[in-house]
Image (cartoon, grey):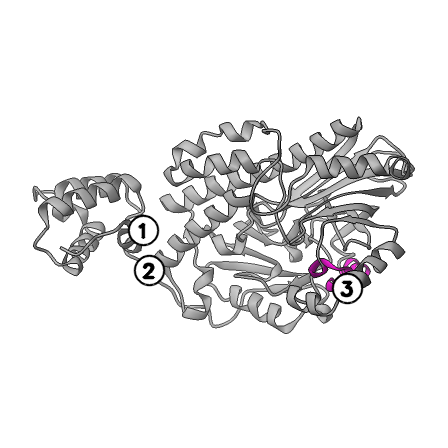
């Protein structure tokens, strides 16, 4: 018998850990004279028609387990639609052709119901960043993305904007002591949060070894465009926060679910690609049926990663505010890189994937940042069905990280920051302000989708330094 591995079993639809262990145990003892291919063929037959194998002493245990745990068969093959589903694009002039083509491909999936493309859109993996996709009872792990539950959180603080100048030194020290960026390590003080006690860590076996890293990374931020920044926010008259219209100190953060989210994304993208076969150029958009065991599992783990991302922001905000003796008057927060159960205007139930897009149901608050030197907008949604109740999640990249690196020097970036009155701790030229689209143009392209409640101006920014 060839050496049978769990990876081989996953490929033919055996996703349950106990079932795989059982198969490997039985195969090593009783099927020594079968070739690996013969054995795999037999296992596929058992998976597809377990009842036919219940009377055989050697196969009955596997068949019984399969019947108790029915999941997708070997795989199903799907063709794309002839025509894409309806998709409204906002700010089309500022969106690169490759991002539009990527969105069009997603709109050809047989499970797609409607799409929308936000004005910050640029090419990503799976869905474009700024892409929104509604599907029928299907979840696409790669359309949610690698950083599940990446999100924004804004604390409006009970201090005027003058606090930033008076306590600049203390703010910088707090940022250095109470934030951590990058793939490795964590904060000096162990962080506590109820999300670490979630039963999902034990219910889904592949999560168990990830918990210790989640404990270590709690309250930290990732690489790239993740940031923690203090600034001033100007709230407009009649804002829906119900706060007086004036300038306040504010704390704004952007990061996601760290190693936990990326491990979940990789695991379930692989399962989706093994069980849902699409034409090669669309294979990354393979989905899990929401009625399948793996679809339900992914939904649970995606929500855990989202809760974990939220917990990271809560720890960052609590730690910094406590260190500086500050109090939040109002917190605004929401995910991008996530999927939600929702309903279209015509009453159809769908799963809405937002890859780098802000939820914008009627009255729902969100934050749309620009760059280190340009404002972030505090907005409330207008609940527009054509946009799948969404808005952009930022200004969007104008050029790639490599191009940004090649076209900007450290000294030129420092000069730009100084002129804008911004202090940067860490950071790289890859995230320089010119790497991003003009936030004013992006906001103007979505005035039908959101109402502006206030403007946040970054002043002291902390990012990862590579």
Coordinates of residue 157 in the picture (x, y in percent): 81, 33
Q: CA distance from mark 1 to mark 2?
A: 8 Å
Residue 433 covered by magenta stretch: yes
Between 349 and 181, the one nearer to me in the picture: 181
Q: Is residue 88 above or below residue 9?
A: below
Q: Is residue 190 above or below residue 255?
A: above
The reply to whether residue 241 is visible in this rendering is: no
Image check: 229 left or right of 311?
Answer: right
Residue topped by disc 1? 72
First of labels 2, 3 by sequence position? 2
Image check: 226 left or right of 38?
Answer: right
Q: CA distance from mark 2 to mark 3?
A: 45 Å
Image check: 443 left or right of 181?
Answer: right
- Marks 2 and 3: which is nearer the front? 3
Q: Which mark is residue 215?
A: none
Do labels 1 and 2 touch, CB within 8 Å?
yes
**Residues drawn in magenta:** 429-445
Coordinates of residue 349 in the picture (x, y in percent): 52, 48
Q: Residue furthest front?
A: 411
Residue topped by disc 3? 434
Residue at x 63%, y 43% (from the top left corner) = 221
**SS class of the residue under badge 3?**
helix
Q: Which mark is residue 76?
A: 2
Q: Quadrant of the C terminus?
A: bottom right
């Amino acid at each position: 018998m060839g050496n049978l591995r769990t990876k081989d079993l996953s490929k033919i639809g055996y996703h349950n850990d106990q079932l795989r262990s059982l198969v490997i145990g039985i195969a090593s003892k009783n099927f020594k004279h079968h070739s690996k291919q013969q054995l795999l063929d037999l296992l596929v037959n058992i998976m597809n028609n377990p009842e036919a194998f219940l009377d055989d002493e050697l196969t009955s245990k596997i068949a019984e387990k399969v019947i108790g745990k029915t999941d997708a068969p070997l795989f199903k093959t799907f063709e794309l639609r002839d025509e894409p589903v309806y998709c409204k694009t906002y700010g089309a002039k500022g969106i690169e052709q490759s991002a539009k083509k990527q969105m069009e491909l997603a709109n050809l999936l047989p499970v797609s119901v409607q799409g929308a493309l936000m004005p910050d859109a640029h090419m990503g993996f799976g869905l474009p960043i700024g892409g929104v996709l509604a599907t029928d009872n299907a979840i696409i792990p790669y359309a949610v993305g690698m950083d599940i539950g990446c999100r924004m959180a804004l604390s409006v603080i009970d201090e005027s904007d003058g606090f930033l100048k008076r306590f600049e030194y203390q703010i910088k020290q707090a940022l250095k002591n109470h934030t951590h960026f990058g793939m490795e390590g964590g904060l000096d003080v162990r962080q506590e949060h109820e999300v670490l006690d979630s039963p999902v860590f034990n219910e889904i076996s592949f999560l168990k070894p990830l918990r210790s890293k989640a404990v270590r990374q709690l309250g930290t931020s990732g690489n790239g465009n993740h940031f923690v920044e203090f600034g001033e926010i100007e709230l407009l008259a009649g804002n829906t926060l119900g706060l007086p219209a004036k300038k306040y100190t504010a704390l704004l953060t952007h990061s996601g679910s760290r190693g936990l989210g990326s491990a979940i994304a990789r695991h379930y993208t692989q399962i989706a690609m093994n069980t849902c076969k699409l034409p090669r150029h669309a294979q990354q958009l393979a989905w899990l049926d929401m009625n399948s065991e793996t679809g339900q599992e992914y939904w649970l783990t995606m929500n855990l990663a989202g809760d974990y991302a939220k917990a990271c922001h809560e720890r960052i905000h609590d730690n910094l505010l406590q260190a500086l003796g500050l109090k939040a008057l109002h917190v605004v927060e929401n995910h991008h890189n996530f999927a939600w159960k929702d309903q279209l205007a015509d009453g159809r139930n769908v799963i809405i994937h937002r890859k780098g897009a802000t939820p914008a149901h009627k009255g729902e608050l969100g934050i749309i940042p620009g760059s280190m030197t340009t404002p972030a907008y505090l907005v409330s949604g207008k609940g527009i069905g054509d946009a799948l109740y969404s808005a952009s999640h930022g200004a969007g990249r104008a050029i790639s990280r490599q191009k940004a690196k090649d076209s900007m020097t450290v000294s030129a970036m420092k000069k730009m920051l100084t002129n804008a009155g911004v202090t940067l701790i860490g950071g790289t030229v890859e995230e320089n302000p010119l790497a991003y689209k003009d936030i004013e143009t992006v906001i103007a392209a979505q005035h039908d989708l959101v109402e502006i409640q206030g403007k946040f101006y970054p002043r002291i920014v902390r990012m990862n330094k590579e």
